[in-house]
Image (cartoon, rainbow, N blue to C red):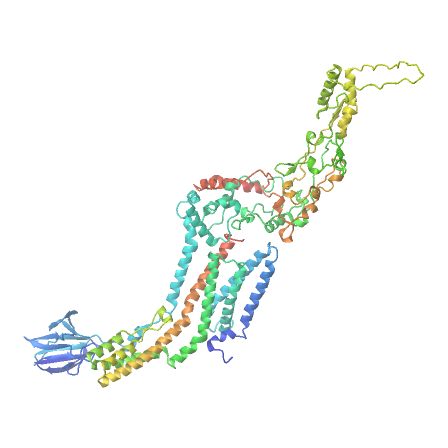
Amino acid sequence: MRLLVTHRLRRTRREGYVERTEVLEGEEIRLGRGSNAELHLPDARVLLHHATLTVEGGEIVVRADPSAEIELDGIPVDIAQLTEGHTVAVGPYDLTWGAERGDCDGAFTIELARPMGDAETLVRARVRTPLLSRRRSGWALGGLIALVLLVIGVGVPLGSFVGEPKVQRQATEAGDAAIIRRAESLWVTEQLSDVHHNLEAGCQACHVKPFAPVAETSCLTCHDTLAAHVGPHATFSADVKLEEGCASCHQEHKGAKGIFPTAAVTEDGCVACHSRDIEPGNGSELAKVASISQHPAILYPPAPASGLKFSHASHLVPEGKRGPTGARETLGCTDCHQSANAGRDMTVPSFEEGCRSCHTLAFASEDPGRRLPHGSPAKVRVAVTEFYEALAAGQIDVPVFEAPVRRRRPGQEARPQLVAPPKPVPVSARIEQAMAGPAVKGQCATCHTLTDGADPAQWGVDAVRFEHDWITRAAFSHEDHRKDAKCTTCHADAAKSEKVSDVSLPAMGTCLECHGSAFEAPEVDSTCVTCHEYHGTTDKNAALPNDATHRFASRSEGADPALADRLGRYLKTAAN
Amino acid sequence: MAAVPLHSGFLVHKRMLYAWLAMLLVCAVAAAWYWQDRLPAEHVDLAFGYGLGGLALAIMLLLAWFGVRKRSFAKGAGRLKGWLSAHVYLGIALIFLIPMHGGFQIRPDIHGLAYVMVLITVFTGLFGVAFYGAYPRRVTANREGLTFDEMVRRIAEIDIELRGLAPQLSEAANDIVRKEAEGLRIGGGIGILFMRPVNRARRARQALMRLGLDSDAGNRVAALLERKSSVLDRLQRDIQMRSRLRSWLLIHVPLSLAALALVIAHAVGMLVFGLGSV
């Protein structure tokens, strides 16, 4: 058997091959990388003895060695016939049928179709250094961090805005509320103030739109009774900015008491205007204020004509006053003045409560227990008339005093004593006498200023007026001051007062003994709004709604056009 | 100066000028913090907090700018060494400045997370300083004058010789050599930071020895595999050390950018949305 083998060594540029031919002779021809193989294939991927070629019936047959593998057109086979148009692969070598066999029994070409490739390229392909080219790892890690932050920081809190607002549900379902609070706690440094704790159930109670600051409308939903800071009568220079919005003074999420403006807020906010634009020349009746410690004097309104004569000095004598029983009693402030209006004010005593126990208004020796009523002269006259008429009719038991017995001197004749019987005085005359005399008129004049009429028995009592609002521009409560101050701390001159018109009210300096800005370390940390109401009302009874949650729940059903309207009106009144 | 490693010279740059400046800054701020904390709370703390927050943010931006500056070695103000020196010491100063900014209250929220991120960034940076003090000399020593490419090429040359010799070996021996070449792996992922992969060339040689060598070709193949395994060791060590040298950056850079983003979110949240003490 002779076979013509064409070795294809390499391709030429023009689609051809550089070739070398060889004639192999033998019963069979062994293919392998072993040195005893007739067709030597020096490649590590070929076995020592890989396959055997024979010619059977004019055709070349390739038989694989039992431990080797050959392929016919890419399909693994044990035996293959080398025919036209087909390729038999022996390791990386391809065998194809050859037409030009000359005088041989058969012909085929063999080519190293799958060379191992460039060693350096292969080695380089095996180098893996992802850490040295850190670009991709960096992006991966950075992306992961960004994703985690996005989910925790934004996704969780914003989850409450997804879908329909469910404030009502959140308020009732403690679990939801807890989740939301946890998310809030990621961003918010401090908790809600005490007064708003009932809003904790849902962020949306105030934060209607994500990423938008809380609008005034949210505040005014509950706080809808606030009046404008400046009344319509005030005039200002044009650049005065009024009503800057709730948050300029009230900030939430600043801790339990954080909602209340601090001294820094009020002094920056209030003093900024009240030290500059508020001037008498501007038509303002207010004085300038530079700080709490430089607060202007308190201007008490002038005392009205009281119609009373009363001396604190003569009542507050240390040895005490003698009462109707003759015993002495030392009077103190609270014997007459009691706390009123939930502790805010002190009472001025009524006659019956404060005066009658000493000033009994007894007027007739015939009936020492009988008292005049405390009322108008007409009422008094009725009482006096009643008494004397009853006396004349003998309806009153007049206490009888025995006349003194005149004894006869020895040696003298007993003579009857001639005593003129008392002239009967008509009742009407007695009444007039009493009314004009010390028994009635005199007693009234002790305390009241009287106006004389045409007749000495016809007199009038001046109107009594001492209920008076002394502090008109600030809120003051006696109750707040009771613990730390005595009555005389502020009303020092009361014990020396001779007249009702004496005003024993404290000057501003007395207030400043305790009150001051927090940063001046006073006894009582104070801000402007400690005493002064910003929102134009001093009505202490105008309480805030307790059930705010309920009202927010109703708001969540949709935007309330009335709210925006109310805000508009509110700002308009403020601007006017 | 001679004792200072080449690659950590930035630590003592200009007689540690930036270390002293950073220390001075921290001491000054600490004194100011002590002083303002004892004043009545009004007015002072707010301005101090804002001021210190602004300062810390400015420092963070300066530190981040180093990433830009280092990419242009010669351009820009100052020497790169000076920039790196300031980068390290100002970064350490941040650890102390930020808690004072927050009044030493670090809570488990976004704001606290920003600080933790800064902390991790700074500590990975300290790892970087330590690595740069140790590894560059060891990398140079390990290479013995060869470049990485030269080492790779040397392995390729050995492979070419093995290709020529292996077909002359027995079936089993050829198999061992062929599989060694096919299974070659140089380097690796995260794992290489902690341990080097098994040297397959050495294993192949041992397997070959067990088979028993009976020819010249066999002896030469064994010698080639021995050489290959030593070059491979060197390569793996090189990759390991250089990976360690850069590994900290893998955390340092993304985390610093995330921290910067978070700090900006924190500042915007505070100033615009009034999340806290405005």
Q: Residue furthest left?
A: A57
Query: Looking at the image, which residue is at 46% across and 68% down?
Result: B125
Q: Nearer the viewer, residue A405 or A82?
A: A405
Q: Residue furthest front?
A: A410
User: What quarter of the picture does the N terminus of chain A occupy?
Assistant: bottom left
Residue B67 quadrant: bottom left
Residue A14: horizontal and vertical position, in percent? 21, 76
Residue A299: horizontal and vertical position, in percent? 70, 42
Judge from the rendering whether residue A115 lies leftward or rightward of residue A228; answer left or right. Answer: left
Residue B190 quadrant: bottom left
Residue A371 quadrant: top right
User: What quarter of the picture does the C terminus of chain A occupy?
Assistant: top right
Residue A332: horizontal and vertical position, in percent? 71, 38
Query: Looking at the image, which residue is at 59% across and 63% down?
Result: B31
Q: Nearer the viewer, residue A266 or A242?
A: A266
Judge from the rendering whether residue A301 lies leftward or rightward of residue A250; answer left or right. Answer: right
Q: Nearer the viewer, residue A203 or B54?
A: A203
